[in-house]
Amino acid sequence: MEAKKAGISLQDACAQAGARIAAMPAKQKIVTCPLCAEQFLSYEELTAHYLAEHPGCVAPVKLRMTVNGRDCSLVVEPHLTLKEVLQLHLGLTGAKQMCDRGQCGSCTVILNGRPTLSCNTLAADCDGKTVETVEGIAVNPKWQPLIDAYCRWDAMQCGYCTPGFLVAAKALLDRNPRPTEQDIKEALSGNICICGTYPRHSQAILEAVTYMVKGGAPNA
Amino acid sequence: MPDTTGANGLREDFRVVGKANLPGLTSYAMATGVAKYGTDFTVPGMLFAKILRCPHAHARVLSIDETAALAIPGVLDVVKWDDPIFDELGANPINGGNRPKYLPQEAHYEGQEAGCIVIAESEALCEEALKALKVEWEILPFITDIQKGQDPDYPQIRGPELLAGEESEYRPGMATSDGYQLMSKHYPTDPRREGNVTWNIKVDGDPDEGWKKADFTLEYDVNIPTCISTIPNPPASVAYWGDSMYKGPGQKIYIEGAPHRRESIMAMYHKSSDEVVQEGLFQGGKYCDWGLRISQEVTPLLSKRMGGRPVRCCNTREETFDLNRNERHMHMRLGVTKDGVITAVEDNTLVDNGAPGSSTMGSVSDRDWGGYYTLKCKDITQRFKVVDSNIGYMHTCAQFVPYNWDSITVAFDLIAEKLGLDPVEVARRNLHGPSSQDDPNPVPSFEASLEIGKKLMDWQWHPAGTKRLPDGRLHGVSFRYAICPRHSFMDYFCKLEYRDGVVHFPTQGPIAGWFSTECFTMIAAEELGLNYEDISVDYDYREKHSDQAGGSDGVTGHGWIVKECANKLKRKILESAAREANRPDDAYRGVFSFPAPPSPLKGATADELDIVDGKVVVKADPSRFVPFSRATKENVTAEYGGYSPKSAWVTGFGRILDTMNTSWCEVAVDDETGEVEILKYCVVPDVGKIIRRTSLESQIDQVVFFTQGCQLLEEFIQDPETGVKLNGNFLDYRVPTTLDVPEVTKEILELRSGNGAYGASGISHNLANSHLIITAIHNATGVWVDPPATPDRVLKALGKCEIGGSK
């Protein structure tokens, strides 16, 4: 009998990330009123319901985004942040809530190619934009040496802030594929880790760069 | 004492233990964002709840008019503190029993949950509803300045219900949420309460004798301010009720977000383990934080109220900015001989007791252990003046305990300064020997750590304010020692199973950030002759084994239990394999059976077998083997519980000199700008034995992160007029970032003399400190700066700036 491997492998985790992306609804078939939970078959029915039942309340808005390569058409409340929409509407949990106000970097995503704090970004402002989350990075084999290096070097303890660091690291490598240690420290200085794992991030990213150039990351 | 009382404690041939760069069991899930923490869980159709928080430092809810809130479309309910629904809740055994009122009417610090919970269709609606409530608060006297609060004439801030029982053996007002009450034992000789002050006095030896031996008296202050820590993920949960196949419809609780000791939810809701489902593992960095928050416990109750509809209760960061260290002012008097030997210690501590129920680990419970008890000096007086306050709630035991390591660090520096001695030499003269306070021998672990630390630092101590660097900045150095702690006082448990050819390690988790299950898996693999990857770790919320081991400190004692369990399992597997190999010929077993070829192990007894490289082999002839996966068809289970062995070098609780560490700091201080730069920070711990190198090193980085933050950056500010927090967020309360933390030079020693697995001990707690950097700044400048040593405070201490330093 073949022994099970201890824990969750890189491939398992990336497959789960892929499954989360695949499970994102491309379009909401049923639209729920956020004030009374009544359900409707179309956005037009919902707005009519608002006029009739909740006059004076601001109705949800339509939003189209490309998230991790998939087009999504959503109906969201205008006050929701991008982070909230990713979690509540699309089921993606990689962007984390830590500070609520753009100080910790845990919610970092890449919006139209730039690292962006999703807790400080209104989803309604992302209409027509492309969003890349850590799940999207995980499913791209190019970045698996980076994830592997993070895990081999324990560039995490509790792991809560780690996806935000990884997204910031990926954004750094997008614009600077051969960063110095100082480049890394500066690029990650907007991310807070309560477990104090900072020195590990430089180590992991520098190692990942090596493997990304020459190939052969140990577990990727 | 080395691990000689168990199996293979003196092992030298490590294949798995000590390895670096083995990814954590769930690291890939954490890194890729698929790991779900409390705030990440959502359930279709869920409602949202938020708890009212007190906007005053101390106030009682007199009335709540919820009419306007309930008029908001989508706001469904407001549950008040006196609602009988809360009476349904049982005690949470981990939180030390029921709170007097589950949702309090009276709040003892700004931001405390009190008064009511609102339930609505969205979180935004909850917030709107909270704003729409008409809450009548009775504002009560408060203390956020303990210097003022100690005045006997200051109005008493705790009502009679909270003071009741103080005359009994234990002081409930000082009890923690996690069973540390024993450490705050009331001494009948202590003076009675005066206003907001309780006393805790401890006298060891004969102070008069100690003072008689002294040639001079050293008097100084060590001021340690409040600091904050936060669980990275603001505590949250989501729950609903489902059908139980056996107990009926709506009898089963599904809850996520409360993974810390799952017994809590079962006990509170009077349910068995089969009736509470909580599969989530990840709880974020809850370092020594033992309590669940209301938001993590109350959602099943709210779901029940809402007819079983799922309810999610979340917090914001600002709502969960908790204390990690209570404010403390130590006025120290030491009797010292002309040779630098301390003969008498008098510690007069004024300390914040926090809000009711705060952990005594922040106030008095470290008085029996730590730095004072490593001294040859036996005459020690500790007078704790403990002031009730409304500063905040201390859920945690902090990383910094015991605080008396810091008063000793400063003492060695001051004695060195006065006598012109190297503080390392002062430490040497004061540290007692390993076996007792009368033991004159050097402590091997300390000496080994010193030797390496001095080399790494290129250690050259100089009197304060006497050295400038070529760039003109002042140069300072400092040194401290501590023991390497371990939680060997805790009772641990382990179960391992050999099932279908695989060794399973079932555990309830949770996963909190210290890689303990990984360490245990490595130990089990080591002892079973397997690879790390061969052990199947089965996360199951119904299992007894919990990862709540106590960081690296706990992993080692807990690891000893795992080691013994693995050896028990190994023995049982070999017995089973031998039994199976030596069964009588089975030709008569049945008409359809074919005679099996004899086992390669046939004829061997269990004693003659071993497990090597994934095979069960005959020791005398390793060519005779069966793969480990076919060792036996039986299911074999081993359990082991209890404590790791007692250290030979122990003189009391937390007084163990078998494994020690030294920390060293070198700073440059710009006396024009007040800026402090850490040039070098070295840590040389003797951890006994490294179990998992990568995470061990990470934990050192973590405590230096805490240490540097609280000495150079972090400042908790409350408005003196209102007691309201002014910087309860990461913008205004600065924690270190990648650009702030120093590189930590580490050399880890393995002298194998701890009393955990293979002679291991931990490192985390006692490396955190409040005064190593501050002492180096003193060595540079000749002046003491109270932490945090921000540039304005440094300049103020140097007399170059009139403003600055908020206290």
Image (cartoon, coloured by chain):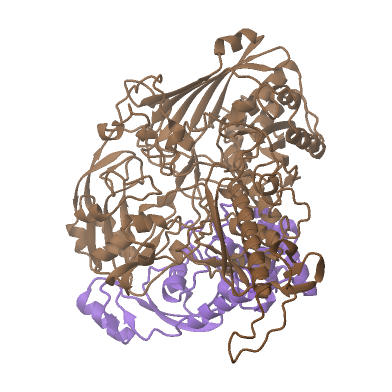
Chain colours: A purple, B brown
- The one nearer the camera, B753 or B683, is B753
Q: Which quadrant would the N terminus of chain B be assigned to in this image? A: top right
Q: Quadrant of residue A140?
A: bottom right
Viewer can see residue B577:
yes
Q: Point out residue B223 in the picture as x, y percentages from the top left corner.
A: 54, 28
- The one nearer the camera, A8 or A185, is A8
Going by the image, does B365 lie left or right of B586? Answer: left
- The one nearer the camera, B436 or A142, is B436
Q: Quadrant of residue B353?
A: top left
Q: Point out residue B28 in the picture as x, y percentages from the top left corner.
A: 61, 68
Q: Point out residue B627 in the picture as x, y percentages from the top left corner.
A: 71, 74
Q: Quadrant of residue A156?
A: bottom right
Q: Point out residue B728 in the picture as x, y percentages from the top left corner.
A: 45, 46
Total label count?
0
Residue reaching furthest to the bottom: B592
Going by the image, does A43 lie left or right of B336? Answer: left
Residue reaching furthest to the front: B588
- The one nearer the camera, B95 or B27, is B95
Viewer can see residue A172:
no
What residue lies at 72% left-to-right and 67% top-to-bottom?
A: A176
Examine the rendered structure and indicate whether residue B245 appears above or below residue B521. below
Examine the rendered structure and indicate whether residue B761 appears above or below residue A135. above
